[in-house]
Amino acid sequence: MSVQTARPPRSTKVFIPELVYFEPNALNYPKGVRIMEWAKKEGLPIRMTTSHNRITNLPGDNEFAKYRMAKNTLVVGVRKTLTFDQSKPSAEYAIPIATGCMAHCHYCYLQTTLGAKPYIRVYVNTDEILQAAKKYIDERAPEITRFEAACTSDPLGLEHISGSLSELIEFMADEPYGRLRFVSKFHHVEPLLNLRHNGHTRIRFSVNADYVIKQFEPGTSTFAERIEAAGKIAKAGYPLGFIIAPIIWHEGWEEGYAHLLEKLKEALPREAVKDLTFELIQHRFTKTAKNVILKRYPKTKLEMDEAKRKYKWGRWGQGKYVYPDEQAQALREHITEQIFDKFPEATIDYFT
Ligand code: SF4
């Protein structure tokens, strides 16, 4: 008789890039110097670049290899554009602390928005970024101004390198009219647990049905890790939320999303349940995104058949393919029901 030993669950390690670039000017900031010291201690190859927007000679024999290398390349620079983009519907503004992500979610919109620059940029001039945020807050006071820190990156996955979220959280703690929010598929929350946040930062975890996580989210923390992290965040007193995105119509989707909500309920500590928010985003794609995704992940099972979708005109140009109304409605109703069944006091911020 053979004895089966249970394999311990895998633990997702923090991101260590294969290559690091610095803009010379980044070394005039304490954060730039600190990251340089860290990169040297880690024994990482270091190169200099005149601009964080112009990294052209990444190693790799073909486009595919270069793309994988870009996702493992960190560029440390100074953020010059301090005008913030809007970030509807989750917040008023996107606060730029990083651009790019090391994970490989097939559906990620950064594939198209970052175009030929999928490498990861972190910005060292956090004080200037915070001064700009302060101006936006003052302009709108006494209305609350919310800033989303995860529009162009997954900043929690970079926190051990940049420390930027911690700075934002502590800054926002003292702003009566400012709020911070970010979302993550990583679980490395330790640096945030003892910060003074004053309840002004809402941390959300991106979760999904098993099928979606397994098929389309390589390089992220596991579901179990994310939920454990969510529990720690709630115990640390932060407002907590979940983003279910992208919601994907797949075989068994009803059980898949019901099971997701069940698992959340089982795993979350009591503190997490009060003031819980959900944001629901159905899968969508543009023609450009489809082409890029099929090139980068040629074996993807992501369904992107225009014939099965509804075309939604875009305000600023290219439209998107979303689910037809009937399917969207079914997804919305089912998931909403499951949420209120398991978490009657939760709020659903939006379904889009
Ligand atoms: S974790 Fe988020 S930002 Fe990173 S690849 Fe996945 S969807 Fe994109």
Image (cartoon, grey):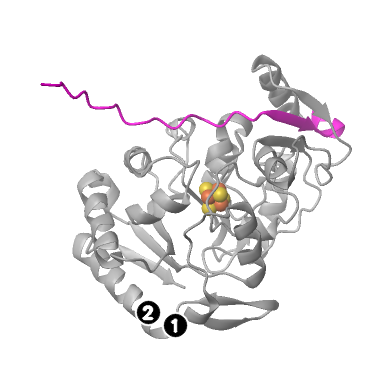
Marks 2 and 1: in contact by CB < 8 Å?
yes
Q: Quadrant of residue 337?
A: bottom left
Magenta residue span: 1-28
Q: Quadrant of residue 351?
A: bottom left
Q: Residue at x 43, y 38 (%)?
A: 187
Q: What's under tag 1, amino acid-wise?
A: Pro
| 289 relative position to 195: left or right | right
Q: Position of residue 74 (x, y in %)?
A: 70, 35
Q: What's under tag 2, amino acid-wise?
A: Gln
Q: Which residue is label 1 attached to?
A: 324
**Picture layout, residue 108 above or below residue 172:** below
| Numbered mark located on residue 327 in the image | 2
| 275 relative position to 62: left or right | left
In front of the other: 83 or 171: 83
> Is residue 26 rendered magenta in the image?
yes
| Numbered mark located on residue 344 in the image | none
Q: Position of residue 146 (x, y in %)?
A: 55, 59
| 99 relative position to 106: left or right | right
Q: Residue at x 60, y 59 (%)?
A: 294
Does the Cβ of the disc 1 residue fall within 8 Å of ligand 1?
Answer: no
> Is residue 204 rendered magenta in the image?
no
